[in-house]
Image (cartoon, helix red, strand yellow):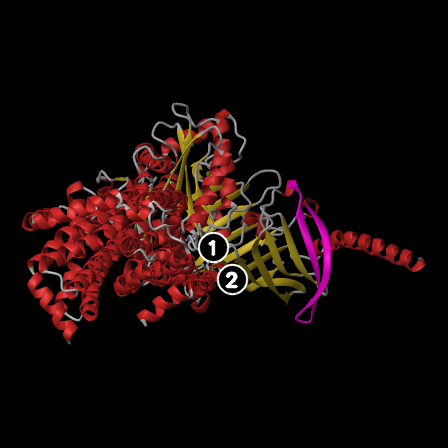
Amino acid sequence: MKNWIIKQSTNHPYRTIIISIMITLLFASGMRFLVIDDDFLKMLPEDMPSRAIWENVEEEFGTTDFIYIAFGQKGESAFNPQTLKAVKELTDSLEKFSDIDEVISVASYKKIDNDSDGFMVVEDLMPDKNITQKQANDIYEYLCKHETIKSRVVSKNNDYLNIIVRPITDFKVNVFADHVTSTANEMLEGYEIHFGGISYMTGMIPMIIKNDVRVLIIIALLIMITILYLNFRNVYAVFMIIGTILLSMFAMVGFLGYVYKITGSDRFLFTMVNTSMPIILLTIANSDSVHILTHFFRNLRKMKDKRLAIKNSMGSLLKPIFITSFTTFLAFITLISAPIQPMIGFGLAVGFGVMWAFFLSSTIIPSAIMIKKWKINSKSIQRESILEKFINHFGSVVFDHPKKTFSIALCLIVIAIIGIFMIKIETNPIKFFPPGHEIRESSHFLDKEMTGSMNITMKAKGDLLDPNILKEIEKLQNFLEDDPNILLTVSIVDVIKQMHQAIMDDDPKYDVIPDSKGKVANLFTMYSMSGDPDDLAALIDYDYSSGLIVAQLKNLSTNKLVVLQSKIKEYMDKNITTDLTIETTGMFVFLTEFIHLLLSSSLISILSSIILIGLTGWIFFKNIRWGILAVIPLSGAVIINFGMMGILGITLNHVIGLLTAIIIGVGVDFAIHYIASYKKHALANYNHDEINRLTFKDVGYPIALDVASNMGFGAMLFSVLVPLRDMGGLAILSMLSTSIGTLVLLAPLMLFFKNKLIEITLKQNSV
Amino acid sequence: MKIKKILLIIFVYSTFIFAMSGLELAKKIDNKKKPKDSKSNTTMVLTNKSGKQQSKTIRSIQKDDNKKQIIWFLSPARDKGVAFLKIEHKNKDDEMCLWLPAFKKIRRIRSSDKSDNFMGSDMSYEDMTTRDLDEYKYELLREETLNDTDLYVLKNIPLPKAKSTYSYIISWVNKNNLTIVKEKFFDQNDKLYKIKTVKYEKIDDYDTPTEFFMEDVQNGHNTKITITNVELDTEVKDYLFQEKNLKRAPRW
């Protein structure tokens, strides 16, 4: 089989290239079936218990994941006809969107007041968009009497107005965010505008990532091309590598399209997760071609015959590159167990892309080499590149001082293990944006001037006409408001107190919960005589048996939120004596659980990948020792990466969890190439020391070149998003750590056990 | 050529007829004989979008085409004893009074908003009142047959003085007795907002509505109103519509 494949390329290069490209294009044609879906919510697992509570609350009360728009002019009172006209017009415009359920603003509040004739008036706080300064002052005075309402819609210094936009329950978060931001930007020209809220962030992030990744991929590709050219010093060689990568990418994306077409499953939609597919394939897919070309150049230098050189290169590399591709494929297939639906499609597609990159590297690269006339005496073939010289020198150092080198590697790992204990598992969505970024600054503004832009929702169950239950809710709200992270709480209790005061001729002493169930019921009946049935629907259900308490939060990390949740639970356990029960939920709570779940599943995926790779190494190299050796550099790299994160204070989050897939994908390649080359040299009857040195010389340079070409991912350090910057930095670190794992950890280790390993190799060969 | 001319004349003439017929039909509906007053029991079942229901029963007396109305709540138990009085005024805000037995207090409420919902239902005060003929423009759109009933389809376009919350209303009018059996209400963005269907019974020679079903298609909420124990033209006196009568429901 191996010889047949090599023969196809060497004897029929044009035919092989045409057939390979045609099959690739056939796969790529599936791109037309690809369905791009930016809906962030589709990524979230449906069977999580917290999602069930969340959806139940949404169904009953509508969603509480608002977008906040604060606008105004610093230092100038917002209570003037012009600014109030702007808030009215924007409120009216937003209410027209079909994905917007409610807009809460000065312009949409109903006032319950007593007029001079003794009538209780239930009417719009702002009757018309064109009002006089006197009417503006009246609105201000009314709000001053109702601080809870005022703090929701007006800034502390009265210079900014806040508009809270609630989407419908089955909204597309990115479309909703776009509707709100574009309408507000268009209508509030001349004002300072701040947007916030978890819906805003989750809606904007996919767009930012897409724009960012588009630019960064190009920069990364340019860096990769430059480094490859500096080392190969041959445009044709660089063209072959980049061409293979691009063809693999097209086939991979088309494959996803076909799978979606056949299955129709949401798992195979092209989502935000899938945007990272090209980056990952770019890193992994170039490895095979780099190995083949470096071997070919070296063989051509020695053999002076391209046919012989390519036959020899492919003869020794076809098996290891198949194993490396297959193990990487397995690593991605483990994502099938991931909690995010699109990750299944992602794992399958990247797995396919890796195998297709192997197919193209084994067919197109040797064929393309065959059709080119190579100048054997050119500098690119005859002279070693700087990197090659450096790595050969590095190899001499390693084998001259194997114990020292190994000790240094071990020390690094021990330090990294200590670092692992320093890792903080934390996600704060606002910290996805660097200091000074518009989104982060707006969020801080909303925390400082308004009542924050995040919230948690508590579903209170019990007889909500019963004053005792209502008093317990009030106490819980007071307890929550004592927490420095909570800026405001809102519940039906606030509305009941307001109605109570209004019915008692606006006497402030009645700003309390009425003392009987009948009075509470009367208040609701009174409201129903003039209010919209949906006015209170966001706070209390139809039969008064459950209600919502919404706590407005400052920006929190997921960890602090978990602490807050347990604090609430503790309070409830100690203080609630009635039948009142409380369930905490909200998109932020749900996201917290989801991120932790994703992280733990990523760690499980890493472990299962390592085990699978060990097993594959054992099966292909027919001895468990080779399997163990194959996973050593990989495990070393994973430890170094996580350890460095702990030491450098980079918090472990779901993005980092995904990055580890790249480490595994690349790391395993290096170890398998090293083992395959070692076995080849052992069988060639070199002396024991020479086997190690020759192996290092054979694979050291391709590994180093592979790592160097992937330094393009340093481009990600310039991303807008902090997780992508971290990912860029860690991608570089992982490239270095995987190569260190192979060249500094595995190489000396195989030297120490050379006798046993050579004995096994020879024994296996004789069998 | 002659035939073309004749067809054109017929077309223009028929268009003219239809334009006239819209207003004429509205006038005919408006001129239909109505009871001077009515007494009835009403059961209202409110259903929200998740299917949860709330039921209310009231006793009501109205006069002058619903311009004067007094209501006593019979159920649910928590609302029993609550009473409501409404008097509409042509040129000023409507007056509403509410007796809240738990507070032993009558609250006078003023609302100028016709879009306010009546008793938390999907019926707004605007939906409950008879349309003033001169506040609307009418177009007879077509004639239809539905469930063996011949119908006129009438478009009602509110003029600015109507201060309506709707951009237009389409009414299906029974040709035989000129009762409105169905209406579709469109919001200011011309999007379908509500659908109302009405069933009638012949009581004392009047076509009396005995069942309404109003669905808010934009929020999935609906209200079914069933009217029973209807008494018409019982010579209800004006003095009944006073605050003092809220505190105790009359015997019947």
Residue B72 image label:
1
Q: Viewed as shown, does residue A586 lie left or right of B136? A: left
Instruction: Say what amino acid the circle numbered 1 marks.
Output: Trp
Q: Which of the numbered marks, if any, corresponds to residue A26?
A: none
Image height check: is A118 above or below A251? Answer: above
Q: Considering only vertical position in the picture, is A83 above or below B179?
A: above
Same subunit, labels 1 and 2: the answer reads yes
Task: Look at 15% across and 58% down and name the residue there.
Answer: A632
Does the magenta portion include A35? no
Question: Looking at the image, which is closer to me, A704 or A416?
Answer: A704
Say whether disc 1 or disc 2 marks the residue closer to the N-terminus.
Answer: 1
Residues packed near mark 2 inside 10 Å, few (<14), some (14 to 19) or many (20 plus): many
Residues in magenta, as a range: B136-160
The chain carrying label 2 is: B
Is B158 one of the magenta-colored residues?
A: yes
What is the CA distance from the residue labelled 1 to the residue labelled 2?
19 Å
Instruction: Give how far across and how far down residue A618 sits, in percent.
Output: 17, 68
> Mark 1 — on which chain does it sit?
B
Residue situated in front as seen by the camera: A61 or B115: A61
Kind of residue at badge 2: Lys
Residue assigned mark 2: B224
